[in-house]
């Protein structure tokens, strides 16, 4: 780990680069661009002090999807892939901070994805200027996504691949066995904890037990669920139901993160990888929904 200063206008890294480190901003602002330096250059957003950038490339060994440019003199902490554990050991509060940043992006994109799906299914937006503005936003996102994938060389198959972090190891506490039909939590419940699956399986449902019941996915060993409750203290967006007798789950709370890291740093790596992969998969689903909405219109 080291502190680095980039002068205004200096490029921190280019899209398409392989990532060997990520950064936390101490002072200054960083611009996030696609096709930087080309005629079709686009600025997506700015990163502020306290925020991380470049973390997904390190967590999942993934090419950089954007170019980062110092918008002012930029003071950062550079954390190499091999230094991540030492960084967390020195500053264990950053584990949850990084998880919350990934979770915030998941939450924001989920809201936009739900809006697009609602438009596709019910065309809730009125005709006229508001609808055209909404569709214009979707077309712009599709264009930016295509530009980014072109520069990184990413394919749909690449996006769905997940870095292999091996098998989960059971914790010493809060590991319990459940039977088929047990409800772990219900849609709408409050909860500031997540779960790791060590055996058996768990189904994730919306509208569970009603005529509109919809099974979103089924999870098996080495999977996580419920993480948005832990990092965002949000109400549950789905119901988690045990699908097999003898299913073994570990309950993980926010206050456990420091101890969990000291006892099993690989599990923290797996949780971060899970969040990063969820964000990439959600991005793919959002792109697909945007394309469907634009074609429908």
Image: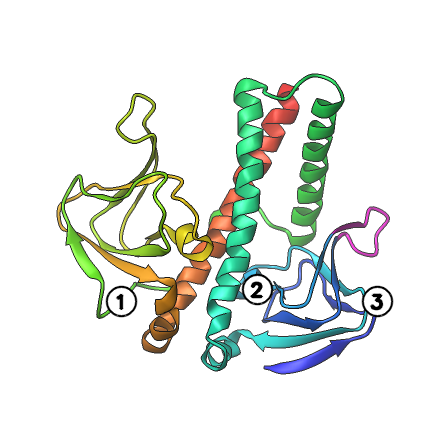
Colour basis: rainbow
Residue at the spot of label 3 = 9
Q: Considering the numbered disc 2 on the image, is that residue within a helix, a strand or a loop? A: helix
Residue contact at pointers 2 and 3, CB within 8 angstroms: no
Q: Which mark is residue 169?
A: 1
Whether residue 181 is in magenta: the answer is: no
Percent of width and height locating residue 4: 70, 79
Rounded to the nearest angstrom, the CA distance separating label 3 from label 1 is 45 Å
Rounded to the nearest angstrom, the CA distance separating label 2 from label 3 is 21 Å
Percent of width and height locating residue 37: 83, 56
Left or right, 252 with respect to 144, comes to left
Please report the bounds of the magenta region as a residue range. 34-44
Left or right, 27 with respect to 238, comes to right
Q: Considering the numbered disc 1 on the image, is that residue within a helix, a strand or a loop? A: loop
- Crowding around mark 3 (Cα neighbors within 10 Å: few <14, some 14 to 19, many 20+) is some
Question: Which image quadrant for residue 74?
Answer: bottom right
- Crowding around mark 1 (Cα neighbors within 10 Å: few <14, some 14 to 19, many 20+) is few
Q: Earlier in the sequence, mark 2 or mark 3?
A: 3
Residue at the spot of label 2 = 55
What is the quadrant of the C terminus in the image? top right
Rounded to the nearest angstrom, the CA distance separating label 1 from label 2 is 24 Å
């Amino acid at each position: 780990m080291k502190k680095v200063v980039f002068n205004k206008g200096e490029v921190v890294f280019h899209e398409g680069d392989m990532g060997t480190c990520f950064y936390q901003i101490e002072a200054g602002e960083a611009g996030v661009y696609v096709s930087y330096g080309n005629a079709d250059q686009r600025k997506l957003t700015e990163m502020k002090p306290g925020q991380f950038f470049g973390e997904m490339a390190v967590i999942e060994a993934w090419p950089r999807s954007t170019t980062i440019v110092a918008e002012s003199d930029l003071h950062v902490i550079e954390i190499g892939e091999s230094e991540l554990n030492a960084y967390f050991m020195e500053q264990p509060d950053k584990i949850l901070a990084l998880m919350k940043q990934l979770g915030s992006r998941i939450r924001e994109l989920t809201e936009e994805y739900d809006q697009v799906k609602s438009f596709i299914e019910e065309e809730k937006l009125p005709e006229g200027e508001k609808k055209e503005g909404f569709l214009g936003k979707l077309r712009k996102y599709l264009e930016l996504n295509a530009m980014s994938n072109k520069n990184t060389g990413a394919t749909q198959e690449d996006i769905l691949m997940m870095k292999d972090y091996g098998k989960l190891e059971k914790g010493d506490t809060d590991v319990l066995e459940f039977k088929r039909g047990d409800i772990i939590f219900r849609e709408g419940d409050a909860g500031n904890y997540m779960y790791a699956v060590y055996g058996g399986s768990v189904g994730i449902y919306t509208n569970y037990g009603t005529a509109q019941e919809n099974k979103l996915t089924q999870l098996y060993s080495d999977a996580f669920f419920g993480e948005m409750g832990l990092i965002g203290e949000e109400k549950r967006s789905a119901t988690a139901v045990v699908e097999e007798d003898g299913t073994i789950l570990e309950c993980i709370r926010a206050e456990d993160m420091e101890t969990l890291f000291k006892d099993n740093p690989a599990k923290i790596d797996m949780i971060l990888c899970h969040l990063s992969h969820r964000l990439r998969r959600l991005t793919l689903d959002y792109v697909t929904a945007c394309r469907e909405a634009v074609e429908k219109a």
